[in-house]
Amino acid sequence: MKNVQNEMHIKLLSKSTNEAFSRSVISAFVLELDPTIAELADIKTAVSEAVTNSIVHGYRRESGMIYIDAYLTSDRNVIIKIRDRGVGIEDVQRAMQPLYTTAQEEERAGLGFAVMQSFMDSVSVKSAPGKGTTVTLKKRIVALR
Amino acid sequence: MLDTNYDNDKLTVFLSGEIDHNRAVGLRTAIDGRLTALRPSVLELDFSRVSFMDSSGIGLIMGRYRSIGLMGGELRVTNVPDNLSRIIALSGVNTLGVMK
């Protein structure tokens, strides 16, 4: 990765109380780039979706660790990788379709990836059954006007 | 803890703070418990004190739309702060006629 000016790595258990923790940590980390309240809210929401996916889907059968690697670059990009070693996704394209969910009984709206795509500049997903899932979120923080 | 008001066959639930997957699980059970006990004709979800919501909040709204619908009642979603309007629009919840 080019022009990294700061980075952070955390590892946390797939407990749903860690959803709030992970978005608070990311939000504090990104503050260095002076984001607007709206930009910060977008990033928090996207991270919350990705971490929830790891907890609800990745580690549906057993708990495990979630790894978050975050980078700030000198050209004001925030790059966040959220990785689990859970069950993985068989058909990533299908999983990314709005309203598609495999957890209906848990009232999952099937909007996680749609929210990430709408709130971030780019979202990439790498996954295979049994190999876990890595979601990479990227957003450029607009310079202070 | 659920902050509610029941008056004239209407159950109002005052949601607050951050609604994520962790919070939504408890809220769902608590709200459905009140619905079953009271069987109101209107369920109002008041979002004025909600500071953050991800798609779990959308699941919570859609689920309550079904619960109250099965009882023949009506859902009203009120006082949604501006910062939540994007996720609401993205979800299509606003096309259900529940936004008041």
Image: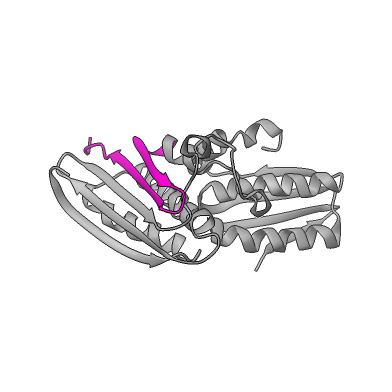
The N terminus of chain A - image quarter: top left
Give the side of residue A52 with respect to residue A106, left or right: left
Q: Is residue A11 above or below residue B79?
A: below
Give the side of residue B95 with respect to residue A128, left or right: right
Is residue B29 visible in the rendered image? The answer is yes
Q: Which residue reaches farthest front?
A: A130
Q: Is residue A145 above or below residue B41?
A: above
The mark tally for this picture is 0
The answer to whether residue A130 is magenta is yes
Is residue B17 visible in the rendered image? The answer is no
Residue drawn at x 27%, y 52% is A30
Q: Which residue reaches farthest top?
A: B95
Residue drawn at x 78%, y 50% is B67
Asked which quadrant contains residue B29, the reply is: bottom right
Residue nearest the viewer, comparing B27 with A101: A101
Asked which quadrant contains residue A13, the reply is: bottom left
Residue drawn at x 60%, y 57% is B24
Residue B77 screen position, x and y as percent: 67, 44
Q: What residue range appears in magenta?
A: A118-145
Residue nearest the viewer, comparing A44 with A92: A92
- The scheme the figure's colours follow is one colour
Residue A85 screen position, x and y as percent: 40, 58
Residue B35 screen position, x and y as percent: 80, 57
The C terminus of chain A - image quarter: top left
Asked which quadrant contains residue B99, the reply is: top right
Residue A137 screen position, x and y as percent: 34, 43
Give the side of residue B11 with respect to residue A100, left or right: right
